[in-house]
Image (cartoon, rainbow, N blue to C red):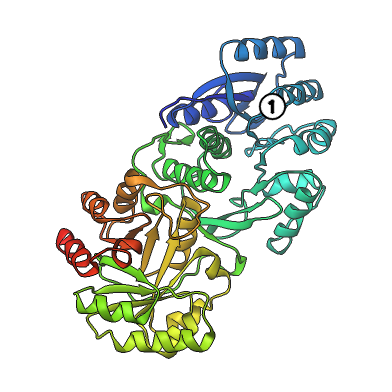
Amino acid sequence: MDKKPAVLLIGGLDPQGCAGLTADIQAVTTHNCHPVPLTTCLTEQTSRGLTNFGALAKDVFMGQYQSCVADFEIAAIKIGLIPSIEIAKCISQIIDQHDVPVILDPVLASTSGGVSLDDDVQQFIVQDLLPKITLLTPNLPELAQLTKTVEITSQQLASTTQNLVSKGLNACLVKGGHAESNWASDYFSDGQNSFYCYQEKLANNVRGTGCVLASSITSQLAHGQDIRDAIVLAKAYVYQGIRQAKALGEYNLFNHTMAEMQLQDLPKLCYDPTMIGSQFNFPSCPNRLGIYPVVDTSDWIYKLVDEGIRTIQLRIKDVSNDTRRAEIKKAVTHCDDSVAFFVNDYWQIAIKENAYGVHLGQEDLHDAKLIEIEQAGLRLGISTHSYWELARALAINPSYIALGPVFETTSKQMPFSPQGIERVKLWTKLLGDNYPLVAIGGINQQRAETLKQTGVGSVAMISAITQADDYQKATRDLINCWK
């Protein structure tokens, strides 16, 4: 995050400094963005509720806007409280002036009670603003109001959200903290991708967390993050802030900090609501899996085990089922109890042949019967390329997590940019002793030596060994550098 993006914050002023623009400014600043506040109203509110919006005149509002953008190039926009139809129409005009991510947190009423928005403002939001924005972040009561639904049950959440998206909304993140559950579970949908993002509820009752979440997402988007990563990182930021909140007066005040992320603050992600709060119990792996070749024949398994390799994966594609079964069966015979032999993808054969473990990509998690892998006693490794995929892996509780590609790679077409050494260092510390981390992608002898300094316990490679002029020397050199 070298450049500091300017984020336009459109919302109301909370005179007690707990929510609204004050919370937005703190969140955006903490995310290394420059806050550009545009005030819609001067509210009157306390812990007992919102008593007056105090909407500004549209001329005053637009005068502010001209000052806001006079000297800054806006990288993203976050919209909060819209107090009147006049201000709503002005905001619509402002959105039209900027081709940037726009996040709308539809503050239809204060969580603590009091006055609420007029129907004409709500109608304008649905008909005019929703098709223009990048992401809507309502809570459950707000989603019910916007869709004119009396009550939204957990069974109706997905269909109600997707119906709103089908009418022109780009994406929606429904905050589920109001639901009666031990889990704070949010639901995301953009028409093509959907998931549940959940964490255990904390006892702290902190005001302004909805504002902070939307501002955190906006900041992440301003820095160029994928929207799914932005959501996961923002959820971690909010969880940490709630967990570390301190009492002052009537409130627990949110703690804005960009201290190193803790694993306990990262949310978990699943696609099936029945899986919220449940996880698997796969056998553990050694925390340092060492040099980890990925090969495509059983012959390579034989040769590399003979050279002292103790963690290895068979990734065999584009062959007949009979050939695949024969190769996996043969590979297992080359590995004694001292070798951690993983089968890529084909978990049914791995179970039948009693392999040490299975490695699955994110796309394979949709179809694999994880309960059968767990019951068979096999270890499970999962590929990740982003924070949202890490959140998905954490929900499954695998034996190890692989991160890649660390560097550019020619062995496989990847839609992800290289992760880089700093990401490996960060994740190694983040996962700690909880999950072994395997770095993969573009790794050769020199890069393996560099990665060892990050503390990561394993590096996986394909061509560094199998395409070497002298595979035996390449293998020995890698093993020696990792000792």
Q: Is residue 376 visible?
A: no
Please provide percent x and percent y for residue 61: 70, 14
Residue at (44%, 73%) from the top-left corner? 280
> Residue 394: x and y, percent?
44, 61
The quarter of the image holding the N terminus is top left
Q: Residue at x 80, y 35 (%)?
A: 122
Question: Which residue lies at the image location 25% right of the left edge and 54% below the top edge?
Answer: 448
Rendering coords of residue 218 (x, y %): 56, 35
- Between 49 and 37, the residue placed more toward the observer is 37
Instruction: Tell me the element at label 1.
Output: strand
Question: As displayed, is residue 52 above or below residue 459?
Answer: above
**Foreground residue among 151 and 57:** 57
Of residues 186 and 296, which is closer to you in this image? 296
Residue that badge 1 annotates? 51
**Residues packed near mark 1 inside 10 Å, few (<14), some (14 to 19) or many (20 plus):** some
Q: Residue furthest front?
A: 469
Q: Is residue 161 left or right of residue 451?
A: right
- The answer to whether one can see residue 84 in this image is yes
